[in-house]
């Protein structure tokens, strides 16, 4: 990794593991993008610029194009940060209303620094470490400025970027848009890939060709949401899993965001995004800074698989807690689908008894243990154990579970309150809402106003009280509705449009004070399943409940899509009962386990109903999982085939290529005896491998080219697993 400045050409060369990022400062002082791609030498790249000014362009302010060095308007250049009002007509990254009412910012080069390590972004999670370039841009008239941060790593193919805006004037400025980055791309022959979804159907893949004008995805929900993950990739034509160039843009952010492309008539493309500027305005006082969330830009010339591996490496090495990221995860039984709200202490004990000796090591008590909570209509916000239901209190079940040699986990939904709760009765204004208007109900609950310090203090106090009183090893942090009626009691009317970003800052603050302040408790994230599955949440939660849909067939789509950006180890996946509670579908136990074992695994069903035979089967499944968990935690992922095909495979390969596991899946079993062959991927072509299930030693090159003909058991939704060991 290195960052070099070539003074004569004013060019910056940033190098990551196998990638180069190059830009330069042009005559006008504008930072012009030149290249992001495979690592290249430090050649001068100015020849790649557009051939010359187009017709009828505005000139750079103060310079006539009849002058000695003709300069056409800014929108002819590929921007490192597009700004508004002085001739750049593309989607700007920043727009601010100045004290006089003008909305102009001309952000030109004003120096740079090269730091050995990236400083943290105040109040927000971000990747750690990495050599960093800080590019200072300033408007010489009004003092408004932007510092652009660029961080490269020697162990992954990403570049992390964000901007910090600065009001260098004497009066308050209103930020109306404050995106994290802009980046120019040559040409416009790209497909946009996005991950759309819904509750129980998160992160499905959409691919669409870019068109002239603006293409955009966003969230207006004060959460990153299940609807569109805060991620966009641009793909060169005909990109597959292992071929083609891909540029990925992943926002480390959990609130309303936007990501967009703008294709200009001259055929060039700009990518930009960050905090959603819809319903956003921020009062930036004189001398104040505004930090934006980080964007992790990945580059791959090995197709989508290469991009995924770049993100997996970056998030595992630089984002997710190093204490937990590569350590074996709790292998848990969760009581939610077993009992929902209707549990007794005895039922929980029976569930615990049944898993002893099966390899399951943690019991997680889900929703319903606190306040008055026999349904989702009451109790949220009252984090005091329900002594009737728990027959004495939390200690009764915690002690029992510990005596059985299991660890104990507990569910919370810290950001929420029910109208029917002591907290709401005492502090109705703690719930987000607009005075004199009704609030929308969603799951019969309201969202607490995390923008207010006293509300955050109350949440931190009540959750930490429980964590400090009882020996709890694991927490599931849920979030089950979106924000409506965005408004904060007591906040200045001028500042109400700061709400969505202030909510994110409030969320990160309570995560710091609960998650980071309890380092020995393992935290899992959740949001009605995977409704807030984003890199910022991964910074706090090493794993996130991927979806409330635990059906193995539907999970293949959800986990495939999620794995485009997020490592397998971050996806919490459970084996549940059949017929499945969400889809009514029946799949075999083996299929359910093989698919759930492609993540941080667990079980979620009534184990007290297990037969001895089932216990024996689960014992074998958990032993198999523990034997290969390092591949889930640290391995490289290769997706083979297409998720829309009848058959495909997930391949997990050890970093040193000594071991691998191929989980083949077939949706429909067909009597016509369809011949399926799936080519293995990711092995060392020069090595020999013992394929246990075939009883054969085969070359890596053979396995890549000839492939495997999986022997699926008869029936629909079946798996066939192959293991490879270097000989
Ligand atoms: C939604 C989660 O996704 C479920 O796993 C469960 O914890 C429920 N909430 C509990 O209310």
Image: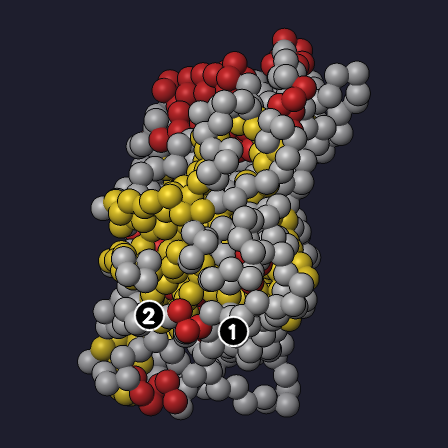
Q: Mark 1 or mark 2: which is in front?
A: 1
Q: Does residue 473 show up? A: no
**Residue found 59% across the figure and 36% down from its top:** 96
The N terminus lies in quadrant: bottom left
Residue 564 in the image: state x and y as whole percent: 49, 62
Q: State the CA–CA distance, disc 1 to disc 2.
A: 16 Å
In the displayed structure, 517 sits above or below 189; it is above
Determine which residue is flagged by label 2.
Answer: 44
Sequence-wise first label, 1 or 2: 2
| Label 2 packing within 10 angstroms: few (<14), some (14-19), many (20+) | few
Q: Does residue 501 show up? A: yes
Residue 620 in the image: state x and y as whole percent: 37, 60
The C terminus lies in quadrant: bottom left
In the displayed structure, 707 sits above or below 473; it is below
Label 2: state its secondary structure: loop
**Residue found 33% across the figure and 70% down from its top:** 44
Query: Which residue is nearer to you in this view: 594 or 611?
Result: 594
Residue 362 in the image: state x and y as whole percent: 39, 40
Query: Which residue is nearer to you in this view: 4 or 643?
Result: 4
* Residue 51: mark in rendering: 1
Q: Residue furthest left?
A: 727
């Amino acid at each position: 990794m290195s960052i070099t400045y070539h003074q004569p050409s004013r060019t910056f060369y940033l190098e990551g593991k196998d990638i180069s990022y190059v830009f330069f400062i042009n005559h006008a002082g504008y930072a012009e993008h030149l290249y992001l791609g495979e690592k290249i030498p430090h050649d001068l790249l100015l020849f790649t610029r557009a051939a010359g000014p187009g017709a009828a362009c505005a000139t750079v302010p103060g310079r006539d194009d009849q002058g000695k060095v003709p300069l056409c308007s800014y929108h002819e250049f590929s921007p490192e940060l597009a700004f508004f009002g002085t001739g750049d007509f593309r989607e700007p990254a920043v727009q601010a209303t100045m004290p006089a009412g003008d909305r102009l910012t001309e952000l030109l080069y004003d120096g740079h620094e090269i730091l050995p390590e990236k400083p943290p972004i105040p109040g927000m999670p971000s990747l750690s470490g990495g050599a960093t370039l800080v590019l200072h841009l300033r408007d010489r008239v009004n003092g408004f400025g932007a510092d652009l941060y660029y961080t490269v790593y020697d162990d992954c193919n990403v570049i992390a970027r964000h901007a910090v805006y600065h009001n260098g004037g004497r009066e308050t400025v209103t930020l109306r848009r404050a995106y994290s980055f802009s980046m120019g791309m040559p040409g416009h022959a790209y497909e946009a890939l996005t991950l759309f979804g819904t509750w129980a159907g998160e992160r499905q893949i959409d691919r669409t060709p870019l068109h002239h004008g603006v293409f955009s995805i966003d969230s207006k929900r004060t959460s990153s949401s299940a609807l569109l993950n805060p991620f966009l990739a641009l793909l060169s034509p005909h990109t597959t899993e292992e071929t083609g160039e891909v540029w990925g843009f992943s926002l480390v952010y959990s609130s309303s965001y936007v990501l967009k492309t703008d294709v200009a008539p001259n055929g060039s493309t700009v990518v930009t995004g960050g905090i959603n500027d819809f319903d956003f305005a921020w009062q930036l006082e004189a001398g104040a800074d505004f930090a934006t969330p980080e964007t992790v830009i990945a580059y791959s010339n090995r197709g989508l698989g290469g991009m995924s591996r770049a993100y997996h490496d970056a998030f595992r090495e630089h984002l997710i807690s190093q204490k937990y990221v590569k350590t074996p995860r709790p292998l848990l039984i969760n009581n939610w689908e077993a009992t929902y709200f209707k549990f007794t202490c005895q039922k929980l004990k029976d569930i615990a008894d049944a898993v002893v000796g099966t390899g399951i090591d943690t019991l997680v008590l889900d929703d319903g243990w606190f306040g008055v909570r026999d349904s989702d209509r009451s109790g949220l916000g009252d984090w005091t154990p329900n002594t009737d239901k728990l027959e004495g209190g939390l200690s009764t079940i915690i002690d029992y579970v510990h005596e059985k040699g299991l660890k104990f986990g507990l569910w919370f939904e810290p950001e929420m309150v029910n109208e029917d709760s002591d907290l709401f009765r005492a502090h109705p204004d703690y719930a987000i809402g607009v005075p004199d208007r009704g609030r929308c109900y969603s799951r019969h609950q309201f969202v607490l106003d995390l923008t207010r310090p006293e509300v955050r203090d109350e949440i931190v106090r009540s959750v930490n009280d429980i964590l400090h009183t009882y020996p709890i090893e694991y927490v599931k942090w849920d979030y089950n509705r979106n924000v409506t009626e965005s408004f904060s009691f007591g906040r200045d009317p001028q500042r109400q449009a700061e709400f969505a970003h202030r909510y994110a800052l409030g969320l990160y603050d309570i995560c710091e004070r609960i998650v980071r302040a309890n380092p020995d408790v393992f935290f899992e994230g959740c949001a009605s399943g995977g409704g807030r599955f984003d890199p910022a949440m991964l910074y706090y939660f090493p794993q996130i409940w991927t979806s409330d849909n635990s059906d193995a067939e539907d999970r293949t789509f959800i986990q495939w899509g999620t794995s485009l950006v997020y490592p397998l180890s971050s996806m919490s996946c459970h084996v549940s009962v059949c017929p499945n509670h969400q889809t009514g579908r029946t799949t075999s136990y083996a299929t359910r386990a093989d698919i759930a074992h492609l993540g941080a695994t667990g079980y979620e069903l009534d184990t007290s109903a297990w037969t001895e035979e089932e216990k024996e089967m689960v014992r074998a499944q958990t032993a198999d999982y523990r034997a290969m968990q390092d591949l889930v935690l640290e391995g490289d992922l290769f997706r083979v085939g297409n998720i829309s095909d009848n058959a495909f495979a997930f391949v997990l390969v050890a970093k040193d290529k000594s071991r691998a596991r191929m989980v083949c899946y077939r949706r429909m079993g067909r009597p016509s005896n369809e011949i399926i062959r799936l080519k293995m991927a990711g092995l060392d072509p020069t090595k020999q491998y013992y394929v246990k299930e075939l009883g054969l030693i085969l070359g890596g090159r053979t396995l890549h080219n000839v492939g495997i003909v999986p022997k699926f058991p008869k029936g629909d939704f079946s798996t066939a697993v192959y293991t490879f060991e270097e000989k």
